[in-house]
Image: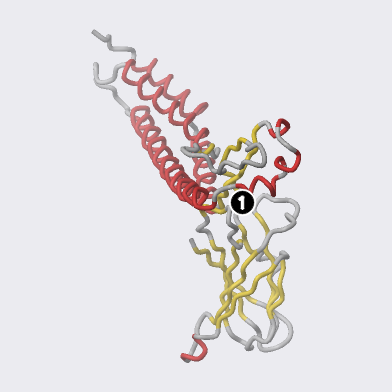
């Protein structure tokens, strides 16, 4: 049988876990990482294995991509989408379990009087071990994993040797408006946006900017909306009406490698009646 333990010893063990291993600051960090991950874009990354053994022409990325069977690749994209959704759901479940577990330990710690035999060291250690396992699993799940191929993506090619490839999920940080740089005049708006945690602009990025009147007063005004493709990180939009609110959204242009991207950042700016001044209100969409 399991022996009852000294409550003070058990409390000391719990206090160590809550102040050194599973602190409120750590759980808050995990929560922020999960929130950021929900806003990220996920893509399939094609990795060639042991490309040195193949012909030079076959080893090039463009040639490898041209050999991939499109229908099979589309099925892998669906698998990648499902894997991302499972990953995010698992992270949410783990974080919720960690939060509840720490609250339960804190409740035990906060008891002014422990009934004799109410708490056993073995049960507490089992709970703590489970929480530490979940914390380790949370960190592992944060990193995108490989996609397992059930079938060859490259059809047999008689003229050359077929390279071996692997697929993995890659992450791109979310696109967000820079509210400190966005500005409005009486008939135009200047928009600036950046990639979260990206110090330098990534060449080749493509963005889609959409805008419309935020409070249209007529049906015709409600139909005033536009979409602009942009390869830079800023854009000036002219021919707007003065003293009106406009809603702008920015997002990446999906490529054929993208498998999951729900985040769209939005900002509401008001044109002014004169040529100087601006006001803004920021909103976010998922």
Picture residue at 53% right of the left edge, 37% below the top? 145
Few, some or many residues within 10 Å of mark 1 (<14, 14–19, 20+)? some
The residue lying at 52 percent from left, 49 percent from top is 73
Q: Position of residue 85 (x, y in %)?
A: 44, 47
Q: In which quarter of the image is the N terminus?
A: top left
- Label 1 secondary element: loop
The residue depicted at 65 percent of the width and 66 percent of the height is: 179
- Residue 11 position by quadrant: top left
**Which one is nearer the viewer's eye here, 113 or 27?**
27
User: In the picture provided, is 190 more to the left or to the right than 215?
Assistant: right
Q: Position of residue 150 (x, y in %)?
A: 46, 37
Q: Where is residue 276 in the image (x, y as percent from the top left)?
A: 73, 82
Circle count? 1
Across and down, in percent, residue 74 comes to: 50, 52
Q: How is the image coloured?
A: secondary structure
Q: Outermost residue toward the front?
A: 158
Q: Find disc 1 in the rendering and name its residue.
A: 173
Q: Is residue 233 above or below residue 243?
A: above
Residue 226 drawn above or below residue 282 = below
Vertical side of 270 occupied by 193: above or below: above
Quarter location, residue 207: bottom right
Q: Which of 226 and 217 is in front in this view?
A: 226
The residue lying toward the viewer, choosing from 192 and 150, is 150
């Amino acid at each position: 049988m399991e022996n009852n333990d000294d409550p003070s010893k058990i409390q000391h063990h719990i206090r160590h876990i809550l102040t050194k291993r599973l602190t409120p600051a750590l759980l808050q960090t995990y929560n922020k990482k999960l929130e950021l991950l929900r806003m990220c874009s996920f893509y399939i990354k094609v990795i060639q294995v042991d490309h040195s053994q193949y012909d030079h022409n076959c080893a090039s990325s463009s040639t490898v991509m041209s050999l991939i069977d499109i229908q099979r690749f589309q099925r892998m994209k669906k698998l990648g989408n499902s894997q991302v959704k499972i990953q995010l759901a698992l992270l949410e479940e783990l974080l919720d379990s960690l939060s509840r577990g720490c609250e339960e330990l804190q409740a035990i710690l906060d008891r002014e009087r422990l009934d004799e035999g109410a708490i056993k060291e073995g049960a507490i250690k089992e709970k703590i071990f489970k929480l530490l396992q979940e914390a380790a699993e949370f960190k592992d799940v944060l990193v995108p994993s490989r996609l397992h191929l059930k079938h060859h993506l490259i059809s047999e090619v008689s003229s050359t040797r077929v390279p071996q490839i692997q697929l993995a999920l890659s992450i791109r940080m979310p696109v967000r408006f820079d509210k400190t740089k966005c500005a409005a005049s009486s008939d135009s708006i200047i928009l600036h946006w950046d990639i979260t945690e990206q110090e330098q602009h990534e060449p080749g990025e493509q963005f889609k900017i959409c805008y419309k009147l935020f409070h249209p007063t007529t049906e015709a005004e409600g139909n005033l909306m536009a979409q602009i493709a942009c390869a830079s990180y800023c854009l000036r939009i002219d021919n707007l009406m003065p003293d009106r609110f406009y809603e702008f959204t920015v997002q990446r242009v999906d490529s054929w490698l993208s498998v999951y991207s729900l985040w769209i950042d939005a900002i509401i700016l008001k044109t002014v009646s004169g040529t100087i001044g601006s006001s803004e209100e920021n909103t976010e969409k998922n």
